[in-house]
Image (cartoon, rainbow, N blue to C red):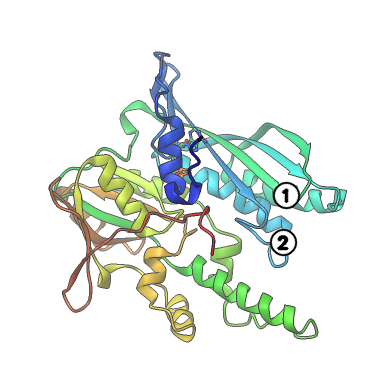
Amino acid sequence: MSNRTELEKLGEFGLIDRITNGFENTQPSTVKGIGDDAAVIDSGDKYTLISTDMLVEGIHFNLMYVPLKHLGYKAVMVNLSDIYAMNGDATQITVSIAISNRFSLEAVEELYKGIRTACELYKVDLIGGDTTSSSSGLVISITAIGEVNKDEIVYRTGASENDLLVVSGNLGAAYMGLQVLEREKEVYKDNPEMQPQLEGFDYILERQLKPEARKDIIHFLKDLGVKPTSMIDISDGLASEVLHLAKASGLGATLYEEKIPVDQETFDTARTFNLVPSTCALNGGEDYELLFSIKQTDFDKIKDNSHFSIIGHFNDKNSSVNIVDRGGVSQEITAQGWNHFKED
Ligand code: ADP
Ligand code: MG
């Protein structure tokens, strides 16, 4: 009898661990392989950064409510975000697409309009890719390339006990934007005559449909003279990313619910959906903000800066990752990102 292990048992991260286990790096130029937001390659004076992400129709996006132009833009942002998470600057991308004949030239051109806008705004060059047909749906895979001065690189692994945990911008908005889009999709399915009710949700819809990678944050930090000790971008939700940093750095951590930045529109929408706003911030994905740690001695440099919220700190290696709620009750965080393989 041969064994059969269901993928849902492993989850995304378990699967990656399993399939990449046993690969050894043999090239002296491979500085960091699997396990961070981008791979790091020694290219002489600097490090080269490389990261790949794939977006699949029906899993990551639904073309019923995502305009192709926005999708192209977002696909680039998702990738640039991983380069910025290494404290580097993105320089080039390659774009590979698989498309079925249900798409027209005009549709693919729309997608590329968004990709071009992203390239222009973020000053990255489109330098290649691949185009193939698909039997069902659209797949976009982008590889982002970047560079960083060797002494400026930031890994997930560099945090120490008592370092402060900081997040840029606010969290949960992209998730609430998705909830609104999903709700309106259901309404439309039941009654195609109904116009979608999207007024009043401008900010959260923009955060879902047209996110921005936080290139600006990398520059703010440089200007402030702050080099994070560890960093990751928030693609799967704060809870999952804190766990990644803690695990990579071999530490525990404490977060404070009341410190997690949630924008007012996100807060209000969460409440009308009967959701807890801070839970949306913790477990909702796709914010593409940066989560990083700093030395306590850098506290004064960022404490009054509106781009940053100090949300907690790292603890010694024997402690777990916890969140303290508004009532002072501490709970362990165990979320493991989205499990794409789980059946609903
Ligand atoms: P991120 O969320 O930052 O995009 P992932 O969670 O997708 O990172 O991936 C974690 C690490 O595993 C990265 O270093 C990534 O390059 C690597 N990885 C993911 N999938 C594979 C795969 N199929 N084969 C080899 N490495 C992979
Ligand atoms: Mg990442």
Residue at position x 51%, y 35% in the image: 2
Task: Kindly identify which residue carries mark 1.
Answer: 138
**Relative to 190, is 246 on the left or the right?**
left
**Relative to 38, is 203 on the left or the right?**
right
Q: Where does residue 223 sit, x and y in percent of width and height?
A: 34, 46
Earlier-in-chain disc, 2 versus 1: 2
Q: Which amino acid does label 1 sit on?
A: Leu
Q: Where does residue 198 sit, x and y in percent of width and height?
A: 64, 80
- Looking at the rendered structure, the secondary structure element under dot 1 is loop
Residue 231 lies, with reference to residue 208, above or below; the image says above
For residue 195, say whether it is visible. Answer: no
Count residues near mark 1 (Cα–Cα under 10 Å), then give few for <14, some for 14-19, many for 20+.
Answer: many
Q: Where does residue 264 sit, x and y in percent of width and height?
A: 42, 78
Q: Do the residues labelled 2 and 1 touch (CB within 8 Å)?
A: yes
Task: Kindly identify which residue carries mark 2.
Answer: 63
**Relative to 338, is 223 on the left or the right?**
left
- Looking at the rendered structure, the secondary structure element under dot 2 is loop
Q: Where does residue 226 sit, x and y in percent of width and height?
A: 27, 45
Give residue 187's quadrant in the image.
Answer: bottom right
Residue 88 lies, with reference to residue 213, above or below; the image says above
